[in-house]
Image (tube, rainbow, N blue to C red):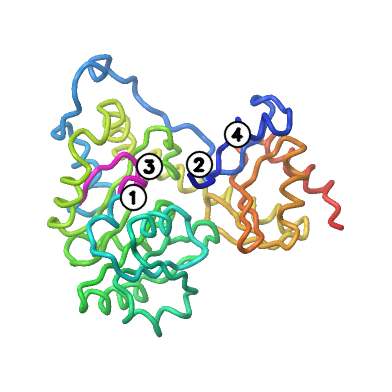
């Protein structure tokens, strides 16, 4: 199993700090709860039904009709490699590690690429896979560039797979208006980040109907629980909270970048996280962890990802800990 953010119990055990005393900035998940209605008790007693309004709420929110609900976008990440014969898969790196691991697990040749290498190598690929905005770097590629890559792949029967887990804050840059009507274009979305509903385990795949049918057949029935479908439908229909959250996250992202910059740490990222490429990333990670602050450490390149503090006490605590950092 690959390492992920949010492993707070392991950190508590390692550093001897109680769970309640941690400031967890390791996940890139919105730090505030979403206002949700009570779940009817009957939903725990019935099998999930696909005519409960979730799909329509998702079509309205994402502005794309051709979609499939999943038990988190992770379900699609693990299943998509099984729908193609073994081939050459280009992955824009660094990248959410589950993507490359899934394709390698099913016998595909995975090649890590930098953005500037794609144009020269794309005609040798069967699939190009990327996260946009990227996790963990936060960099975003223009839709026009991605659609050009898709056209070149499609001409050879290839796929462009775009994981948009962090796109909800900037929906104007999404490829979803083109997904569904374009063979070979697959877009993944998640309710875990912007909505802060990672525990619900719900995501969506958007693609042409034929491919979604194949994916649904592979995954089998009842992939999303009834209570999760209820919660998701409410969140996707809550336009007012969506608008408020975009503003709050935008302001918080700017604030986090400014806080890091104020301590001499030049980071980049999205509204939900900031990424710091830093030669002493491991040492800074240890410094923060010993103060009960968990951030995400990456080895290649040495870097840290900072999520958003949930309240003013968290902001002050991070500010103080960074002020106490004395690099060797």
Mark 4 sits on what residue? 8
For image coordinates 31% across by 35% down, the residue present is: 232
**Distance between the Cα atoms at labels 2 and 1?**
24 Å
Quick check: is 307 in the magenta stretch? no
Residue 30, labelled with which disc?
2
Q: Report if the CB atoms under discs 2 and 1 are less than 8 Å apart.
A: no
Determine crowd level at label 4: few under 14, some 14-19, many 20+ residues with C-alpha closer than 10 A: some
Q: Nearer the viewer, residue 118 or 40?
A: 118
Question: Who's the residue at 39% across and 81% down the image?
Answer: 121
In three-dimensional space, the C-alpha distance between marks 1 and 3, rounded to whole angstroms, equals 18 Å
Question: What crowding class fits label 2: few (fewer than 14 Cα within 10 Å), some (14-19), or many (20 or more)?
Answer: many
* Residue 70 highlighted magenta (yes or no): yes
The magenta stretch spans which residues? 67-76
Does residue 71 appear left or right of residue 199 in this picture? left
* Circle 3 residue: 191
Question: In this figure, which residue is indicated by the disc labeled 1?
Answer: 78
Q: State how far apart marks 2 and 3 are (Cα).
A: 10 Å
Residue sitting farthest toward the bottom: 120
Q: Residue at x 67, y 29 (%)?
A: 13
């Amino acid at each position: 199993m690959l390492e992920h953010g949010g492993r707070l119990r392991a950190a508590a055990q390692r550093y001897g700090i109680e769970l309640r005393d941690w400031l967890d900035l390791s996940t890139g998940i919105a730090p505030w709860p979403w206002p949700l209605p009570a779940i009817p008790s009957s939903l725990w007693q019935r099998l999930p039904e696909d005519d409960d309004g979730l799909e329509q709420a998702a079509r309205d929110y994402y502005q794309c009709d051709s979609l499939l609900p999943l038990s988190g976008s992770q379900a699609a990440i693990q299943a998509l490699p099984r729908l193609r014969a073994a081939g050459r898969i280009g992955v824009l790196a660094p990248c959410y590690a589950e993507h490359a691991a899934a394709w390698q697990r099913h016998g595909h040749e995975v090649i890590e690429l930098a953005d500037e290498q794609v144009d020269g190598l794309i005609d040798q690929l069967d699939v190009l896979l990327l996260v946009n905005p990227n996790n963990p770097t936060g960099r975003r590629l223009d839709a026009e560039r991605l659609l050009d890559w898709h056209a070149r792949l499609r001409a050879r029967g290839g796929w462009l797979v775009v994981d948009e887990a962090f796109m909800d804050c900037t929906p104007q840059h999404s490829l979803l208006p083109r997904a569904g009507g374009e063979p070979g274009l697959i877009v993944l979305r998640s309710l875990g980040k912007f909505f802060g509903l990672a525990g619900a385990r719900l995501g969506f795949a958007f693609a042409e109907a034929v491919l979604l049918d194949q994916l649904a057949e592979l995954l089998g029935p009842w992939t999303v629980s009834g209570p999760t479908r209820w919660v998701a439908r409410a969140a996707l229909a809550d336009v007012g909270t969506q608008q408020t959250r975009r503003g709050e996250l935008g302001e918080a992202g700017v604030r986090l970048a400014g806080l890091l910059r104020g301590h001499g740490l030049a980071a980049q990222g999205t509204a939900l996280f900031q990424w710091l490429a830093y030669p002493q990333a491991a040492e800074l990670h240890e410094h923060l962890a010993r103060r009960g602050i968990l951030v995400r450490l990456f080895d290649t390149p040495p870097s840290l990802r900072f999520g958003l503090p949930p309240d003013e006490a968290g902001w002050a605590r991070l500010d103080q800990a960074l002020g106490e950092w004395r690099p060797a």
